[in-house]
Image (cartoon, grey):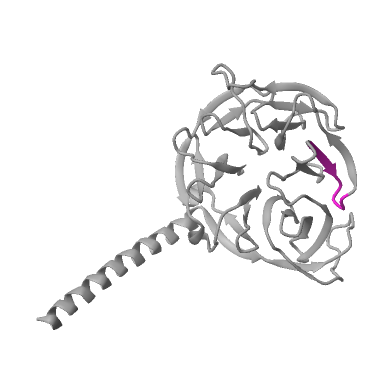
Amino acid sequence: MWRNLAGSVLLALAQIAGADTGSDASAIEHAPTFLSPNRMIVGGFSTPASPVPGRAPTGPYLKLLQPSALAANGPDLYIADSGQRLLLRIDTVTQSITPLREIPPSPGVRIKVGSDGSVYVLRPDRGEVARLTRDGRPIATFSAKYEILQPADIVIEPTLNRPWISDAAGGVFAFHPSGRKSEPLVGRGDGFPDELAGATLLAANRARVVGVDPRCRCILDFDREGSVIGKFGEGELLNPADIALDVHDRTWVVDRGDRSLKIFDHGQLLAVLKPAQLGLVDITAISIDVYNAYIADAASGRVGVFGITPPSRR
């Protein structure tokens, strides 16, 4: 009797394990319909800062410790490594790493790249955004201390090429590329009145700008003047931490609430990808450059590089 009982228990456990394995396998198979893994970036040999792309590295090997924010533009990948307190530029062709400047280890540092290749670094501790050349030299500083009390994100609006800076309270302000504040776009005061929308996290592609409204935990669509022309994702986001757009107009959101990457298309939630499906420990930040997605995994000190699968090929 005991032999039969033990055999039944083992059979039940095997069936449970097989079911779990099957569900994991199907989840992993689901991921390539949106992302195809290319490689993992864990570090590279250092090189002095130079405005010339493709310079061969000559210095010691630098390993990523805690990549917390990133921005990709062609062969250049900018990373805010809060573990090393450094802004780094990785040449993805030569695999060289260039330390550009120190950054604070505190959360909230954001990075974006302009169409001219300049990099924008948002520092909440200073209440400003610095615009830098490829080799880290300063070009301009953006701040508006009476309106932007705590800068949250920056994006370069694609049609007028104006930097937009958001505040932690939800206000969004436009600036001239030289650093002069142009005008408030959207905003709201304390209490978040219903008639005013606002955004903290921002993203743009060549055609549109989106932002995350913390009040509704939803995604807002903006026109080039900053007016809200659409809203989606309400009830499907828990704690959005980063956002990006691809060339197919899909919206990608890093959601810290359930440790996932959520993909929206025309306002509809298409997929929810977990770190294990992408070979990662965690999903910290995302940047999309044309057909490639760069996903930071701060927990393991890596950046995953993935090819984006076009919708027609899914």
User: In the image, what residue occupies the spot 50% across and 35% down?
Assistant: 266
In the rendered image, the residue lying farthest to the left is 1
Q: Is residue 113 left or right of residue 6?
A: right
Q: Is residue 222 left or right of residue 261?
A: right
Residue 302 covered by magenta stretch: no
Identified at 82% across, 66% down, the residue is 46
Residue at the spot x=57%, y=39% of the render?
249
Q: In this picture, is 173 found above or below 247?
A: above
- Residue in front for this viewpoint, 142 or 190: 190
**Left or right: where 123 falls relative to 15:** right
The answer to which of 159 and 153 lies nearer the viewer is 153
Could you tell me how many numbered marks the image carries? Answer: 0
Above or below 80: residue 121: above
Most foreground residue, 270 or 312 = 270
In the rendered image, the residue lying farthest to the bottom is 3
Give the x, y percent position of residue 38.
Answer: 60, 63
Q: Can see residue 114?
A: no
Q: Residue furthest top?
A: 195
- Quadrant in which the N terminus appears: bottom left
Q: Quick check: 205 above or below 19?
A: above
Residue 314 x/y as whole percent: 46, 51
User: Where in the figure is residue 111, as x and y percent of width and height?
Assistant: 73, 45
Residue 250 to residue 259: above or below: above
State the extent of the magenta-drawn residues as a range: 128-136
Residue 35 seen by the camera: yes
Q: Is residue 133 magenta?
A: yes
Residue 61 in percent (x, y) is at 78, 71
Instruction: Name the residue: 65% across, 49% down.
Output: 287
